[in-house]
Amino acid sequence: MKKQTIFSLMAALVLTGALVSCDKNDNPDDPQVKTSGGFYTINNGNMAGSISSSITTYDYTTNQSTPALQDAFKAANGIELGDGAQPAIIYDDKMFIPVYDSNLIWVVNPETLEIITSIRPEAPATGPRALAAADGKIYVSLFTGYVSRIDAKTLKIEKTIATGPNTEQMAIANGKLYVANSDGYNYEDLENQYTNCSISIIDLKTWTQTYIRDTDKVLNPTDMATNGKDVFVLCKGNYGFPVPSTVKKITGDDVIEIAQASYITVHDDDLYVINCPYGMSHADMSFDIYDTKSLKLKGTIAKQTEGTDSWIDAPAGIAVDPYNGNIIILSYHITEAGFSQYMQPCYANIYDKGGNFKTRIECGVGALGVTFFHK
Amino acid sequence: MTALTYKTLRLSIIGITLAMSCPSLRGNTIPDTSPEDTDSTTYSLPYTLDELEVVARSIKDDVTSSSPLFRIDDERMKALGVTDLTDALHRMPGLNIRDYGGAGGVKTVSVRGFGAAHTGVIYDGVALSDAQTGTIDLSRYSLDNVDDVSLIIGDNSDIFMPAKGAATAASIVINTGSVPSGDDARWHFNGQFRIGSFGLVNPYFKLAKTLNPKFSFSAIGEYTYAKNDYPYTLHNGRLTTRERRENSRMHSGHGEINLCWRPGVASTLDAKIYYYDNNRQLPGPVVLYNPTSDDTLHDRNFFGQLTYYNKLGQKVQIRAISKFNWDATYYHEVDGKHAGGFKDENYVQREAYLSCAALYTPTHQFSFNYALDYSYNNLSSNLATTVGPWRHSVIQALSGKFSNHLMQVMARLLCSSFINGVKSGESIPDRTKLTPSLSLSIRPWYGRLIYLRASYKNIFRFPTFNESYYYHLGSLQLRPEETHQFNVGATWQGGSYRALSSIAVTGDIYYNIVKDKIVAIPMNMFVWTMANLDKVRAFGADITLDCSLYLAQRHNLLINGNYSWQRVQPRTAKSDPEYNKQVAYTPQHSGALSMTWQNPWVDLVIKATGVSARYGTNANLPGTRLPGYIELGAALMRTFNIKSHSIDLRLDILNILDTQYEIVRRYPMPGRSFRLTAGFKL
């Protein structure tokens, strides 16, 4: 039986992983003693091209990255990551990687990427999409419309709550978990596209849920960003047909629109916004920084010069290093006709805190998330 | 061979074919049976002696054709141990068969680097169409009632055919369901039962009779059940595990009735009613760590077809065809991401088709044909995003042919007009296109069966309904995808020499261009659209060999093989990473070889199919490489004759070496398997 085979394999992996990692568990989450070591890019791969997910590593101290077309996860473990990997987090000295199509969450050593164990969501709550963590718990959103709570010590799913259809990214702030329920698969009914979407706000103490459900304000939310105080949501709308993709700030049970946006991230009091909808020329794309409090435009993310590596062709994601403020922008390569190459490796451009270009590394196919690690 | 014997043979071929079945059905698509080739006096010939048949079969228009033409008929298929339609197509060069594995796996065919939508499938004289996807799934058609299968690359040198038959870059021609001739009063019954590995059960029957000299019929029924839960080896880095395909069962059946009415000496009216039903589970691609799939697909297809043929005097022949086709697809996806946990996508396509063709043969050497085809296609669906597209197509073909004992020249001009509309919203623009083709075949030495050929064909494929209208993906601005084909080749057919009873060798080299290739381009990760973006260039060579060796009394060795080399290169822009690489899923080298030892005891066939490495992406990303493979098969066959009845027993061993390979990434093919077939002929 296939399932049994796979589970016995996993059991073997768990054992191996446990032996390797038994001495790792020191004081979690103390930013004072950390310096940033580098980052991983999580590369989704491409299901249409049957290209598996992969991880690219970049080490600040050596300036070395995983060689092009190679996979740091496979190099560490000898097996594939799976299909449909999503942005990963590091918490309690473990790295958690949700893998959507393979329906599992890898738990790996954040320094070596060696497998510690894996967590398998059970039906009906399947298809891990995003992770968030606080106070000894990992929260995973499942695309079938649920959020599950995993204990960071036992690595077992403890509780599951139904949130809304096609759950995407999440954010934790002020003791609450904000969940984007995109309803993204409800696109057939053109009159009522994404109308079951919402933002769930789950009180982590009481495990109770309230909603923001006004589809005039929140339509097709897919991404969340927070600095621990302010929460921002990216609403894709219907990709500009006619509702554009925008970033909004969540204020209690309401939202305030800030700008049109394709990718967002937050670092301290800065909200980083890239706007690059389909068909937009580079000249019209925006790479802006907004103040998280006043919501005023206060700067440009990265200094780009055409014809050099500092230029971003087709943005695929943005992240800011919490330890040193480095800005990482993921991008697809483009064809001569200007189309993104989804079946080709992506690249990551690294800029310093001031937006000055430092270097470019090649990533795997479908890079969509950045996870920073410390040393 | 002298001119006289050659001519006699050619006449007898026609005579035999006429005697075998209704000429109108077969003449549509088989060059050598086309009445235009018939000399004015050949109607005295329909009842040619049977013993000529063996000789006659060895000389066909395969040889004289001015474009590459490869044919295999039922007897040859039996002799070569062909197991199914895919296997038959493997005996033809330049084909690239996409196969998702197992009895229920979808199978599409592309030729010489053109996409599968450029391959027409002509089934009993009528080009099948799928206006929604543009491709025909050949797994629908079983081999059991097939009389012959041909591959025509470029232009068919039979000019007396419907215009639509010339409207693709290449065609696979399948002729089935023949009825007994007017003077054959016997009952014909053919029953067959097949069982095989992975739960295969496949009964089949055909019943046929000529009720009076003017009226014949045949009825065919077939059912296939397969569990398809075949094991496969999964390589995941350092881990190698043995897995099994799940959710792969299928129930499939097909039934048809063929009627033939001969109101006059030179006229026939054929009717065909056909129904096909396939209810299958879809195992989906192999996704690591998550083998779950509960999706199902139900295909239903009904068509009715009428063909009228008449020879009006010595110089004019006409043929009219009408067809109504109804094709439904019900796709059921089980996934919690959909409201209610599943999604149903139902599509129904309808086609009404009319074709009239007239052949004028003023002299023995010249013939002209005008054909007018009209079809109406529409698509409806349960999806709210469906716009309800429809299309009127008018295709006209004007062809001229000159042939004498030295050469054959053929020219054709095709005029295709499309009128497009939708129930709601905006439709793609109407279009008219003129496309020419020209081909030439020379026989430089009259005493020898050596033919040299050269051909050019310009054709296009019209954007499909999906490409034009599919929600978000479709684009209303698409232009047709245009192709240019150039081919030069030669055929040599040798007579018997010592132990060599017969030999035929063909060789072709080609150069193809695809312009305005329709590709999906991403607007973002989730929203894609179609555009006329790419250019593709293909060049390659095909070689085939077919020979029979006489070993001893009642011992023969038949050898049949082909080899293709093809380079199919994206040529859109030099800076693109795919520029000059090999188009996805196209091997550079492919070929097949089979050997049959015919003997008084048990005929033995050993066969091999092989392709070189391919890539899953146009940019040939190393991680998407599919290694090359060779699949070896064998068949043991014995026929017992009891009075006028015969019993056929046959054992097939497929993939003897249990080679694990994939044709499409993530869709493993079955390993070693067995099939046992018992047939009875009354």
Image: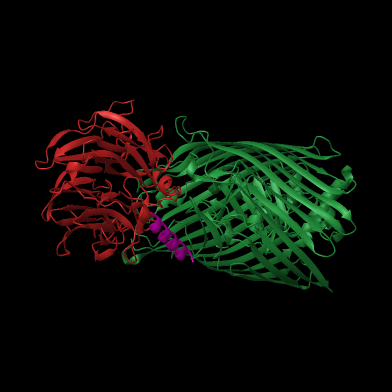
Chain colours: A red, B green
> Is B494 left, or right, of B298 in this rendering?
right
- Asked whether the viewer can see residue B182, the reply is yes
> Is A21 left, or right, of B641 in this rendering?
left
Name the outermost residue toward the front. Answer: A23
In the rendered image, residue B151, in percent from the top left (x then y), is placed at 66, 49
Tell me what residue is drawn at x 15 percent, y 41 percent.
A268
**Magenta span: chief secondary structure:** helix
Out of B189 and B371, give the one closest to the viewer: B189
Check residue A69 for magenta coloring.
no
> Is A70 left, or right, of B12 in this rendering?
left
Out of B392 and A292, give the one closest to the viewer: A292
Check residue A5 for magenta coloring.
yes
In the image, the segment drawn in magenta is A1-16
- Image quarter in which the N terminus of chain B is found: top right
In the rendered image, residue A217, in percent from the top left (x then y), is placed at 17, 52
Name the outermost residue toward the left. Answer: A294
Quadrant assignment, res A17: bottom left
> Is B353 left, or right, of B364 in this rendering?
left
How many circles with numbers are drawn on the protein?
0
Out of A221 and A309, give the one closest to the viewer: A309
Tell me what residue is drawn at x 44 percent, y 58 percent.
B379
- Asked whether the viewer can see residue A259, the reply is no
- Image quarter in which the C terminus of chain B is found: bottom right
In the rendered image, residue B244, in percent from the top left (x then y), is placed at 52, 63
Residue B153, above or below A361:
below
In the rendered image, residue B626, in percent from the top left (x then y), is placed at 54, 47
